[in-house]
Image (tube, rainbow, N blue to C red):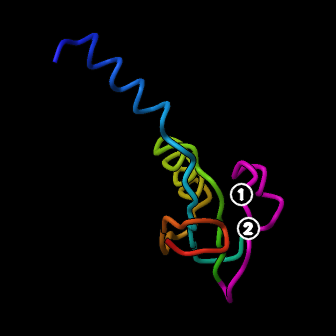
């Protein structure tokens, strides 16, 4: 495939991507005032775990969220792709 055709193909693929819902569990309690730092994602609690859920536009944004979790020194329990905020994939 020619380089220009490859760029057009990649651009077309990117434009067809939809935001995906994720549920991220971390150990510990994260104060709700951090919600803005997590781009408006929902923060809930289950026992001594924090659940951060919401739409993520692409893999780069997901990695950005995970970097913020790392920067807060929160132990990551799981990252799960779901159909919607209330549903499971």
Compared with 17, 79 (above or below) is: below
Which of the numbered marks, if any, corresponds to residue 83?
none
Residue at the farthest bottom position: 47
| Left or right: residue 54 compared with residue 19 | right
Is 12 or 57 nearer to us in this picture? 12
**Crowd rating for badge 1 (residues with CA inside 10 Å; few <14, some 14–19, many 20+):** many
Magenta residues, start to end: 31-48
Q: Residue at position x 57%, y 72% from top?
A: 26
Residue where numbered disc 1 is placed:
41
Q: Which mark is residue 43?
A: 2
In this rendering, is residue 42 above or below 10?
below
CB atoms of marks 1 and 2 within 8 Å: yes
Q: Is residue 37 above or below residue 87?
A: above
Left or right? Give the position of 31 relative to 56.
right
Estimate the x, y position of residue 25 in percent, counting from the top left.
Answer: 57, 73
Q: Secondary structure at mark 1?
A: loop
Q: Tell me the quarter of the image containing the N terminus.
A: top left
Residue 33 coordinates in the image, percent (x, y): 83, 59
Residue at coordinates 41% horizontally, 24% vertically from top-left?
A: 11
Q: Quadrant of residue 32?
A: bottom right
Query: Real-space Cα distance between discs 1 and 2?
Result: 6 Å
Horizontal arrangement in the rendering, residue 5 relative to residue 72 (left or right): left
Q: Is residue 54 left or right of residue 13?
A: right
Where does residue 15 sit, x and y in percent of width and height? 49, 30
Looking at the rendered structure, the secondary structure element under dot 2 is strand
Residue 74: percent from left, percent from top: 58, 67
Q: Residue at x 18, y 12 (%)?
A: 2
Q: Is residue 87 magenta?
A: no
Q: Nearer the viewer, residue 23 or 2?
A: 2
Q: Residues within 10 Å of mark 2 (few under 14, many from 20)?
A: many
Tell me where residue 34 sits by quadrant: bottom right
Residue at 57% over, 51% down: 65
């Amino acid at each position: 495939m020619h380089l220009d055709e490859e760029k057009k193909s990649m651009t077309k693929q990117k434009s067809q991507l939809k935001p995906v819902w994720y549920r991220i569990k971390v150990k510990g309690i994260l104060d709700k005032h951090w919600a803005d730092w997590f781009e408006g994602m929902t923060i809930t609690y289950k026992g001594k775990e924090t659940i951060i859920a919401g739409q993520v536009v692409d893999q780069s944004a997901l990695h950005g969220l995970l970097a913020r979790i790392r920067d807060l020194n929160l132990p990551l329990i799981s990252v799960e792709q779901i159909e919607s905020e209330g549903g499971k994939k």
